[in-house]
Image: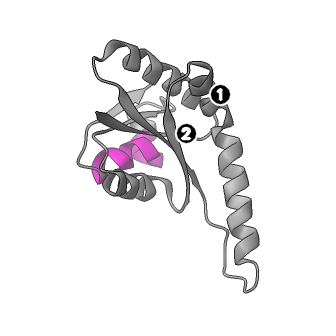
Amino acid sequence: MHKVLVPVDGSENALRVVRHVLMLAAEVKSPLDIHLLNVQHPLPGTIKGVAEQARKFHQEEGEAALAGARKILDDAKVKYTYHVSVGEAAPTVAQMVKELDCDQVIMGTRGMGSLGNMVLGSVATKVLHQTDVPVMLVK
């Protein structure tokens, strides 16, 4: 079974990626093992006594960002697993690729163009450099 990691941020572009994954799942002979991932940015600073509230906040925000993608897969009756992590996006995606032993990452890009990516950097570009598995970018 081909295991794919699909980072989702709740945007329309991320939903387009999930629809693309559904199309791919219909075309392949063996089922895909789909893992949705939302990465929440850590809260600034360390405040004692609020760790549980921060964890709940990140989980709720992550689940909200994953809701649209989950609905698409649920409506299509496609099995998947979802994850919410906290950290910087690209290194967290790379770490999850290793932890889950994924074969591929399928993710969106804002399509800013190569100059925009060089100047600003992008999660997609960083993931390409930080993972050893194929990365499919969906515009």
Q: For the point 23% across and 48% down, which residue is it? A: 132
The answer to whether residue 122 shows anywhere in this view is no
Q: Residues within 10 Å of mark 1 (few under 14, many from 20)?
A: few
Q: Which residues are magenta?
A: 117-130
Label count reads 2
In the picture, measured across the screen, residue 87 lies left or right of residue 134, that is right
Three-letter code for the amino acid on which mark 1 is drawn: Lys
The secondary structure that most of the magenta stretch takes on is: helix
Q: Position of residue 100 (x, y in %)?
A: 36, 52
Asked if the residues shown at circle 1 and circle 2 are in contact, with their CB atoms under 8 angstroms apart, the answer is no
Q: Classify 127 as above or below 20.
A: below
Asked if residue 132 is among those painted magenta in the image, a careful observer would answer no
As rendered, which of 22 and 117 lies closer to the eye? 22
Cα distance in 3D space between marks 1 and 2: 13 Å
The answer to whether residue 119 shows anywhere in this view is yes
Q: Secondary structure at mark 1?
A: helix
Q: Secondary structure at mark 2?
A: loop
Q: For the point 40% across and 36% down, which residue is it? A: 115
> Of tags 1 and 2, which is closer to the observer?
1
Q: Position of residue 21 (x, y in %)?
A: 44, 24
Q: For the view shown, which residue lies furthest in the left direction?
A: 132
In the picture, measured across the screen, residue 22 lies left or right of residue 14, that is left
Q: For the point 48% across and 47% down, which residue is it? A: 120
Marked residue nearer the N-terminal end (1 or 2): 2
Three-letter code for the amino acid on which mark 2 is drawn: Val
Q: Residues within 10 Å of mark 2 (few under 14, many from 20)?
A: many
**Residue placed under numbered mark 1 in the picture:** 71
Q: Position of residue 92 (x, y in %)?
A: 44, 57
The label shown at residue 10 is none
Q: Classify 52 as above or below 84.
A: below
Q: Quadrant of the N terminus?
A: top left
The label shown at residue 8 is 2
